[in-house]
Image (spheres, rainbow, N blue to C red):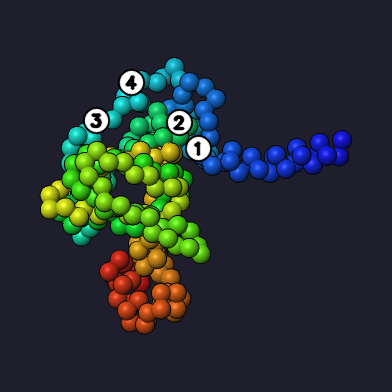
């Protein structure tokens, strides 16, 4: 009897994190997000399914290139629960990523999603870094039709190493994968992280840290 209790507890300990490793499973056909609700829940409150319309499950315009006229030379067009309310509770989303030549989708993470990327046009150099202590770079050059996977939570990037514009399509295992761009988070936080802390963490002098912070928040008080 004691062995059975111990075995049950161990099974729960092992499986509990797995059960929380993705978005909650739906308990009905769909749960269209009610963005007008003032109730705060993990995700969005469902609107009455009788009020659902085709537009709740629809998005148009993914064929249109994003504007890459920015310092990174890239543009992400997300199609997540914010764009399609019907994605609520379905645990999936996607994004179109456009790259100018030498365009970069800078090192970032998705805290709630694994990403699978397919190159539609052009050439991309992509990679991710494993967690401490190894910090191993897993990288590859992708051509049109190639597919690459970025595991959930790991820092990754995509760079257009070709001479022509590139386009990729990403699938993500969350209705709201989130994104943390590393440089923006570290040097662009508001209020800013102390330059003493960043200078020590990155082994830089404080003047260099101050300059980097100024690139993200300018004259932030």
Q: Which residue is mark 1?
A: 23
Q: Position of residue 199 (x, y in %)?
A: 41, 78
Q: Is residue 207 visible?
A: yes
Q: Secondary structure at mark 2?
A: loop
The span from disc 1 to disc 4 (Cα, nearest Å) is 23 Å
Circles 2 and 1, Cβ within 8 Å, touching? The answer is yes
Whichever of labels 2 and 1 marks the residue nearer the N terminus, that label is: 1
- Which circle's residue, 1 or 3, is located before the other in the chain? 1
- Crowding at dot 4, Cα within 10 Å, few <14 / some 14-19 / many 20+, comes out as few
Give the x, y percent position of residue 125: 26, 53
Q: In the rendering, at what x and y percent does residue 18 appear?
A: 58, 41
Label 4 SS: helix
Residue indicated by mark 2:
90
Q: Quadrant of the N terminus?
A: top right
Closer to the camera in the image, 90 or 127 = 127
Proximity of marks 4 and 2: CB atoms separated by less than 8 Å: no
Q: Is residue 55 left or right of residue 73?
A: right
The 10 Å Cα crowd at callout 3, few under 14, some 14 to 19, many 20 or more, is: few
Q: Nearer the viewer, mark 1 or mark 3?
A: 1
**Callout 3 touching callout 4 (CB < 8 Å):** no
Quarter of the view holding residue 108 = bottom left
Q: Which residue is mark 4?
A: 54
Whichever of labels 1 and 4 marks the residue nearer the N terminus, that label is 1
């Amino acid at each position: 009897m004691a062995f059975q209790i111990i075995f049950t507890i161990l099974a729960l300990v092992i499986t509990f994190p797995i059960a929380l490793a993705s978005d909650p499973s739906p308990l009905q056909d769909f749960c269209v997000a009610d963005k007008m609700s003032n109730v705060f829940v993990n995700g969005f409150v469902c609107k009455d399914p009788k009020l659902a319309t085709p537009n709740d499950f629809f998005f148009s315009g993914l064929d249109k290139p994003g504007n890459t006229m920015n310092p990174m030379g890239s543009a992400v067009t997300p199609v997540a629960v914010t764009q399609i309310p019907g994605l609520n509770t379905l645990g999936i989303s996607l994004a179109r990523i456009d790259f100018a030549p030498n365009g970069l989708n800078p090192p970032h993470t998705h805290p709630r999603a694994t990403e699978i990327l397919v190159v539609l046009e052009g050439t991309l150099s992509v990679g991710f870094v494993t967690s401490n202590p190894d910090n191993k770079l897993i990288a590859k050059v992708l051509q049109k039709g190639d597919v690459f996977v970025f595991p959930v939570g790991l820092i990754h990037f995509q760079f257009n190493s070709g001479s022509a514009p590139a386009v990729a399509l990403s699938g993500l295992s969350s209705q709201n994968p989130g994104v943390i761009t590393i440089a923006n988070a570290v040097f662009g936080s508001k209020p800013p992280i102390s330059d003493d802390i960043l200078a020590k963490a990155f082994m830089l002098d404080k003047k260099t840290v101050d300059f980097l912070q100024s690139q993200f928040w300018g004259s932030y008080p």
